[in-house]
Amino acid sequence: MPGTWWIRAFPTSDWPIRSVIESLPLVEFLEVGVGVIQVISNRPGAGKTCLIGALLSNLTEEGNQAGYYKPFSSSPSTDLDVSFVSRQLLSEGSSLVPIPQLMPSTGETSAISQPVLESLSALGAATGITLVEGPDLTLAEGQASSIAVDLAAIADSRVILMVQYGRGLDVDAVELLAEPIRERLIGLVVNHSPIHRHFEIAHGLITPLRHNGLPVLGAIPEDRFMLSVTVQQIIEHLNGTWVQAPENTEAQVDRFLIGGNIMDSGPSYFGRYSNQAVITRAERPDIQMASLMGETRCLVLTGGEGPTEYIRVEARKKGVPLISVAGGTISTAEALNGLLEKANPHSRSKVRRFSSLMQEHLDLEALNAALD
């Protein structure tokens, strides 16, 4: 039966595993290396979980057995990536590999590498492809890390490299990143590519990298929806309260509109965008009703007062949650600073959106050929 398999993670630490690589039997490398694809990135937040989620969904939809394994995590007992994949991306009816969560390192590298090999072997026996969410080449604190490279050697895995676009990223910088895993590299993806730099990235980065022999799959542009936050994150960030029983709290919001003295008609103003939250004073039912006619995901009512009863009824009818905050409209809008930093990839809708971006911007024919 087609399905997805998964195993949990244990803490990240820059442990020296090269010393044990040569001591492990070659047969173990060969056994676990077949069908193992490790996705690594140049820095945290580059998009590994989105890419793996899209690949897992596509593979299982096509009837393939696929496994997921994240061997290292800064918070193994509460890892949101593992929780999201296991709870929301597993196809219904699929089985789980009954392997216990790996424990923190005791400093003995052999005690760490052996469980990794055993886990990969178990997944390899049960699935066709195992997607490993590997560590970043640069840690959150900015230090370089060799764990991903060492893990690829231990597992004898092929590698997909996610590179988050940023200042200073050029051909030399990417070549330097790819050099340690060049022989294992089956695909390189540039993510968060600014739309206004499309021509520069295509001709000044991707073309010369391909000319140098790197298998660049393409560049995925910045996308507003991928940076969206949930209604639940909004109320927590603003320290607000629910006006009535909340619903659709996991709806994604990628735009905020202020409902004030607008010049356009309500339907024209609030009907321009989808996935929006509207911030307006609680005593403006006219603006609130107009916003409920559009693609509004939640209403943030300022001033601490409650809305009229017919606004409550209309919001319940449309499934739009109402949030009350004590501050004024402008101060509430200003309080949203920093909210987008809490955006995460843990949403089925974001996985679907990322899959669509892959279809549009990556050479999936080359990627699928590498995955076979």
Image (tube, grey):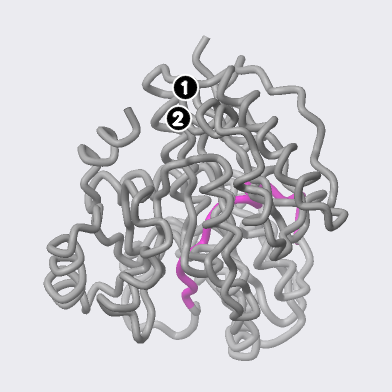
Amino acid residing under circle 1 = Gly
Decide: is 291 above or below 251: below
Is label 1 in a helix, a strand or a loop? loop
Question: In this view, which residue lies farthest toward the front?
Answer: 23
Q: Which residue is mark 1?
A: 128
Q: Which residue is mark 2?
A: 35
- Around disc 1, counting alpha carbons within 10 Å, would you say few (fewer than 14), some (14 to 19), or many (20 or more)? some
327 lies left or right of 190? right
- Around disc 2, counting alpha carbons within 10 Å, would you say few (fewer than 14), some (14 to 19), or many (20 or more)? many
Q: Where is residue 115 shown, x and y percent of the image? A: 74, 37
Q: Where is residue 155 shown, x and y percent of the image? A: 55, 40
Quarter of the figure with the C terminus = top left
Q: Report, in whole angstroms, how far the alpha carbon at label 2 lies from the one at label 1.
A: 6 Å
Residue at horizontal 30 percent and vertical 48 percent from the top: 358
Magenta residues, as a range? 243-257
Dot label at residue 340: none
Q: Quadrant of residue 179?
A: bottom left
Residue at horizontal 57 percent and vertical 54 percent from the top: 150
Q: Where is residue 154 shown, x and y percent of the image? A: 58, 44
113 lies left or right of 359? right
Question: In this view, which residue lies farthest toward the top?
Answer: 1
Q: Where is residue 281 shown, x and y percent of the image? A: 62, 79
Magenta-drawn stretch, dominant element (helix, strand or loop): loop
Is label 2 in a helix, a strand or a loop? loop
Amino acid residing under circle 2 = Gly
Decide: is 140 above or below 131: below
Residue 313 in magenta? no
One can see residue 266 in this view: no
Does the CB distance between marks 2 and 1 fall below 8 Å? yes
141 lies left or right of 200? right
